[in-house]
Image: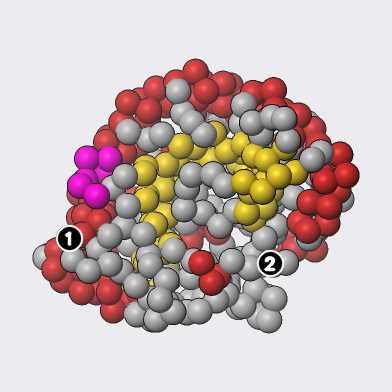
């Protein structure tokens, strides 16, 4: 293995969030614009062979965590095949998946056998009508069926990601806590972020999670805790239970000083920061026949430009690309 991948601020990059598609079968209000259909053509996406080549280069640089994302990754055909190929790469120790779980029921067993072990599932409401409103017509029962199939398949931990929005779903936080207690899931609460026009619109419903944490502390005894994974959540555990609650706070308490990740979009664009425009286009290199050492060199040079932090508060209009295209 070559020397570790380190950015200018001495942060070690060991985690790649790998988007396999910009498409999604839901239309969440804070992610995709209403009526949007301008998705990339599949020819623009990296092939499985190209993805494997890039991830072998990252593994040679010390990356050991990979999360499959989208859009909705389960809309990419034969995803379990790709998962198995990534799980077999020497050095990759942790393969996980972010999903809305709409199609998870029929893919759970295959994904588990392919080597995926941890799941993050987006779930912003337990009320069918509200869920449909937030997701542009999604069916809550499909998500719940997917969750139960994943639990039966053996995935652990299963974390529910709830984007908390004022006057939208903030009244369901305690219900979500009880749901996770009942089923043995972890809960992660997320602040809205100004990524794309949809994200900026959602920030009108922004709720500071420090306020939510204080509210939960009035009802539950919260103890400091941690969970496996390379993400930015700060965890507490509800005393007397196994439930862990994570707070992802890019706005009220950013976590840039410990950033350990980059994002690879479905078209091969490597984004160095969710809240900045620094990037590297890997697809042209791959299709020009670049060798692994060429990819390693290009990745090193790109990470040497990784910015210190996002500027969501200072420049909320800066990022025009939407989350599904960036990679969740």
The residue singled out by tag 1 in the image is: 1
Is 289 colored magenta in this rendering?
no
Q: Residue at x 30, y 69 (%)?
A: 5
| Viewer-closest of 50 and 4 | 4
Q: Residues within 10 Å of mark 1 (few under 14, many from 20)?
A: few
First reached walking from the N terminus: tag 1 or tag 2: 1
Q: Residue at x 50, y 25 (%)?
A: 150
**What element does badge 2 sit on?**
loop
Quarter holding residue 237: top right
| Viewer-closest of 181 and 24 | 181
Rendering coords of residue 199 (x, y %): 67, 62
Q: Is residue 206 above or below residue 29?
A: below
Whether residue 91 sits left or right of residue 164 in the image: it is left
| Magenta segment | 85-91
Rendering coords of residue 168 (x, y %): 82, 47
Q: Quadrant of the N terminus?
A: bottom left
The residue singled out by tag 2 in the image is: 253
Q: Residue at x 59, y 66 (%)?
A: 255
Residue 279 visible at all: yes
Is 88 colored magenta in this rendering?
yes
């Amino acid at each position: 293995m070559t020397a570790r991948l380190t950015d200018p601020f001495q942060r070690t990059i060991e985690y790649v969030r790998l988007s396999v598609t910009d498409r999604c079968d839901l239309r969440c209000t804070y992610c995709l614009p209403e009526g949007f259909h301008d998705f990339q053509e599949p020819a623009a996406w990296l092939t499985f062979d190209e993805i494997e080549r890039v991830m072998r280069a990252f593994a040679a640089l010390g990356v050991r965590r990979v999360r499959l994302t989208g859009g909705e990754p389960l809309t990419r055909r034969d995803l379990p095949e790709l998962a198995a190929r990534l799980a077999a790469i020497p050095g990759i120790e942790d393969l996980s998946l972010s999903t809305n779980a709409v199609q998870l029921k029929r893919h759970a067993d295959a994904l588990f056998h392919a080597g995926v072990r941890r799941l993050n599932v987006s779930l912003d409401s337990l009320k069918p009508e509200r869920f449909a409103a937030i997701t542009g017509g999604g069916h809550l029962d499909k998500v719940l069926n997917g969750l139960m199939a994943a639990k039966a398949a053996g995935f652990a931990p299963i974390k529910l990601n709830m984007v908390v929005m004022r006057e939208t779903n903030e009244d369901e936080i305690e219900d979500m806590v009880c749901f996770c207690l009942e089923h043995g899931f972890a809960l992660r609460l997320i602040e809205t972020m100004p990524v794309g026009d949809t994200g900026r619109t959602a920030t009108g419903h922004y709720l500071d999670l420090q306020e939510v944490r204080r509210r939960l502390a009035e009802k539950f005894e919260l103890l400091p805790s941690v969970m496996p994974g390379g993400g930015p959540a700060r965890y507490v555990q509800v005393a007397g239970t196994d439930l862990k609650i994570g707070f992802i706070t890019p706005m009220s308490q950013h976590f840039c000083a410990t950033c350990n990740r980059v994002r690879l979009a479905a078209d091969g664009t490597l984004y160095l920061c969710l809240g900045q425009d620094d990037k590297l286009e890997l697809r042209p290199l791959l299709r020009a026949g670049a060798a692994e050492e060429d990819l390693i060199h290009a990745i090193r040079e790109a990470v040497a430009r990784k910015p210190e932090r996002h500027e969501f508060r200072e420049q909320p209009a800066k990022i025009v690309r939407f989350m599904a295209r960036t990679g969740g």
